[in-house]
Amino acid sequence: MSKARIKHLIERRLPKAGLVQTALKGVQLFRVTEPVPCVPAVYTPTVVAIVSGTKEAVLDGQHHRYDSSRYMLCPMTLPVEAGSPQASPENPLLGAMIALEPHVMRDLAIEIESAIGTARKSGTMPPQSLALAGWDTGFTQALLRLLELLDNPLDAKVLGPGRLRELYYAVLNGEAGAAARRAFGVGNEIARTIDYLSAHLNEPVTIDDMANHIGMSRAVFHRRFKEATTMSPIQFIKSMRLNNAAMRIAEGKTVNEAAWDVGYASTSQFSREFKRLYGQSPREWGHAVQVPARLL
């Protein structure tokens, strides 16, 4: 019944295809009625809850498909390919995206770790890059209570931060909770490194820079980074830059502008690496794919 109510709340605000930013900070609702192929995207820390249809994210060749039975947690910024290849007017993709505020998630994760003791502390394992979790009662009720605030702007403004915190807490205690706590709790060095990289995407960044940023040896950093993201640091940097560039090209930027934005001084080198990864030149890709990045 609660999930049906959530679907009704979303449908009421999105009778047609599109994406809307709600009065709740970081909460977006979406409806997709045409197939969207999996194309390069960059996920930021987010929870995506689907109430109709199927969505897909591909990370380093591994496919993550989720629907109304499971929500998706992305606990750190990641270069992925994403889309909804099966969406149609008869079976639209319908759901909500909730951005995760790192400082709130961090405070909650540390509170939980402190309360439950050392047995489940996050520092002993690297964070998990993407996680799928079943809609348990805590998550479902928290999401419903959050979206019900949209009926009253004053409620949304005054009660919204508390309801978002309630949803975050449900995620941290749900099936994806271990992945969330490892990314935001004690020992979240890899997630902090990715934040650092994202803020310096158009600058030269080396493995030593990232390792030094968190006070870790190069060898240990390389191993833990690959455990967390499935990619080596160099692969990750290249994918982040190329995915960001691909999104800019899809939104209308020129190849030169996109290359410069993500730190490539040479357009020819950018074009070679882009074609090696995606099988098309940047210009060919831009003509073939015109998908709004916000729908991915």
Image: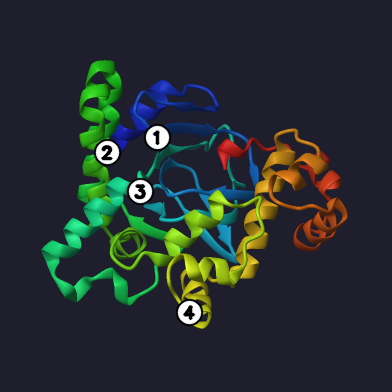
> Disc 4 residue type?
Ser
Q: Mark 3 or mark 2, which is nearer the start of the sequence? A: 3
Q: CA distance from mark 3 to mark 4?
A: 25 Å
Q: Which residue is mark 4?
A: 217
**Local secondary structure at mark 1:** loop
> Disc 1 residue type?
Gly
Q: Mark 4 or mark 2, which is nearer the start of the sequence? A: 2
Q: Mark 4 or mark 3, which is nearer the start of the sequence? A: 3
In front: mark 1 or mark 4? 4
The answer to which quarter of the image holds residue 192 is bottom left
In front: mark 3 or mark 4? 4
Q: Dot 1 surroundings within 10 Å: few (below 14), some, or many (20 or more)?
A: some
Q: CA distance from mark 3 to mark 1?
A: 12 Å
**Local secondary structure at mark 2:** helix
Q: CA distance from mark 2 to mark 1?
A: 9 Å
Up the image or down, 99 lies above or below 170; here it is above
**Local secondary structure at mark 4:** loop
The answer to which quarter of the image holds residue 251 is top right
Q: Mark 1 or mark 2, which is nearer the start of the sequence? A: 1
> Disc 3 residue type?
Pro
Residue 116, given in percent of the width and then of the height, sits at 13, 66
**Local secondary structure at mark 3:** helix
